[in-house]
Amino acid sequence: MRFSGEYNVSIDLKGRVSIPAPFRDELRQDYDSDSLVVTRYKNGLVAYPRQRWDEICANVLAMSPGPKREANLRNRLAPARECHFNAQGRIQIPQALREHAGLDKEAVVIGMFEKIEVWSQRSHALIVAESEALLGEDAQGQADLGF
């Protein structure tokens, strides 16, 4: 399974975000699913197919007790919500998650192979700039990858 692509989408007054058709097709084909599990991630949101999310939960729950496990439980697992697609291919993102990501009227939805990220346009621009700076520090590594 490989989600890929970057899409600018609108958010309606009810907080519903359109998930691009290619992503929905991948979900149906590879997971027989009509939903995503959405949670907080940095200054945005991240969404996973239920099967992948269950694997992540198992990984977190298998961690040794301590502050890192608690932080993952508190900041990633606890706020997660399963969001089902409506007939128009939109998911209702809970208000608390929208507020965390600063989502208002528009969003950027990005396929990141095994997951989908949802960012406000402002946060997306910042994370892209940070990523570009990081990659620029390793020109040889980028060349070795073929970029």
Image (cartoon, grey):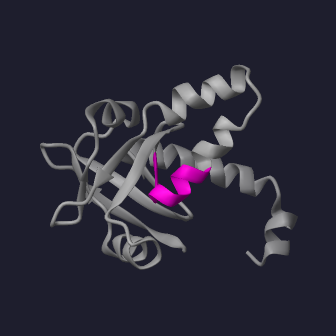
Q: Which residues are magenta?
A: 46-55
Looking at this view, is 60 or 128 the one in front? 60
Q: Residue furthest top?
A: 67
Q: Quadrant of the C terminus?
A: bottom right
| Picture residue at 42% right of the left edge, 75% below the top | 26
Residue 63: image x %, image y %? 73, 34
| Picture residue at 60% right of the left edge, 52% below the top | 55
Q: Is residue 53 magenta?
A: yes
Q: Residue furthest left?
A: 13
Residue 5: image x %, image y %? 46, 70
Residue 66: image x %, image y %? 73, 20
| Picture residue at 35% right of the left edge, 47% below the top | 82
Residue 56: image x %, image y %? 60, 48
Q: Quadrant of the N terminus?
A: bottom right
The answer to whether residue 31 is above or below residue 109 is: below
Q: Is residue 74 magenta?
A: no
Q: Is residue 146 left or right of residue 121?
A: right
Q: Is residue 135 left or right of residue 103?
A: right
**How many labels were placed on the picture?**
0
Looking at this view, is 132 or 6 the one in front? 6
Q: Is residue 2 left or right of residue 104?
A: right
Q: Main secondary structure of the magenta part?
A: helix
| Picture residue at 41% right of the left edge, 79% below the top | 29
Looking at this view, is 130 or 7 the one in front? 7
Q: Is residue 122 left or right of residue 1?
A: left
